[in-house]
Image (cartoon, rainbow, N blue to C red):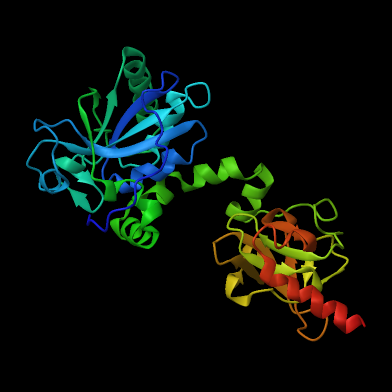
Amino acid sequence: MGACGKMKAKENPLDLNDPSLQKATFAGGCFWCMEGPFEQLKGVAKVLSGYTGGSKENPSYEEVSAGKTGHVEAIEVFYHPSQVSYEELLEVFWRNIDPTDSEGQFVDKGSQYKTAIFYHNEEQKKLAEESKKKLAQSGKYSKPLVTPILAAQTFYPAEDYHQGYYKTHPFQYRFYKMNSGREQFIEKVWGKEDLKKKLSPLQYKVTQEAGTEPPFQNEYWDNHREGIYVDVVTGKPLFSSTDKFDSGTGWPSFSKPLDATQILSEEDRKFGMIRTEVRSKGGSHLGHVFPDGPTPTGNRYCINSASLRFIPKEDLAKEGYGDYLSLFDRKSKTRE
């Protein structure tokens, strides 16, 4: 993990001695990757990157990263317990590490990158032990959990250029996180579970298990409003109301995709039929395409409403899809 230029100090710094704040300390390997997930939580006031668990006072990054001091890279989380619980912090911690790795974390190996939970009182210790036991019994991992639960020790804030690194150096951070293997591991272990929380049971069944919703009993089959349809999982644009037509089948039908690069097709031989399945580039099952559509394409993309989210024309700019407003300007000019 490399170091970059120093960032400017913030004005009006938060009072970390505020009695309404409580403190949690976690070691999860590279501290760059641990700040963001916690700072996004409502109720978290501040996250500091630093070093703890070692013998030397005020160690430098160079000393810790060389494994000479016994410290681990860690974060200190200052939070309002009335808004976010310690249990919730523990869940975020487990979801961002590999608790079965005794050698470090992902591409970073060495004692300085090992994981740990550092408790500040007996209640935190109890909750951490219960959380670890519950995760171990979940069957999510085939190997034992090796993350220790230890009493908090002196925490030394890291150098300024490490603080908020994911915000001050977003490109370098994203490059590091992707190439470290952390992001791929998190997606593999937790991705499906997160989707089950994000999606309705029908949306999950359709997009992840190639299910089919009932005809004439779905959200968009009879929708005539102007707008675009995006992947319910990734938000990528898939279809436009300008290409939507009434096929009489009871499902939303389109003559062509809005962005062909976002659509994948493959042969589907299930149920004794030979059809062409269409999926989003993000991997979601959408429906099927048939060669019985209107001119000029001759195609009918028969799509499940549950795989889509509709964004009306008037909300396109607000939701970040302003580039597609021109579709409807052209339609209006054609009518004139």
- Tell me the quadrant of the picture where the N terminus can be found: bottom left
Percent position of residue 265, x then y = 60, 72
| Residue at the image position 27 percent from the left and 46 percent from the top | 160
The answer to whether residue 163 is left or right of residue 36 is left
Vertical order, 313 against 146 (above or below): below
| Residue at the image position 66 percent from the left and 67 percent from the top | 238
304, 241: nearer the viewer: 241
Percent position of residue 237, x then y = 65, 66
256, 34: nearer the viewer: 34
Percent position of residue 173, x then y = 34, 57
Can you tell which quarter of the image residue 19 is in? Answer: top left
Residue farthest toward the front in the current orientation of the protein: 12
Can you tell which quarter of the image residue 152 is in? Answer: top left
Residue farthest toward the right in the current orientation of the protein: 336
Vertical order, 5 against 104 (above or below): below
299, 220: nearer the viewer: 220
Any part of residue 300 in sight:
no
- Tell me the quadrant of the picture where the C terminus can be found: bottom right
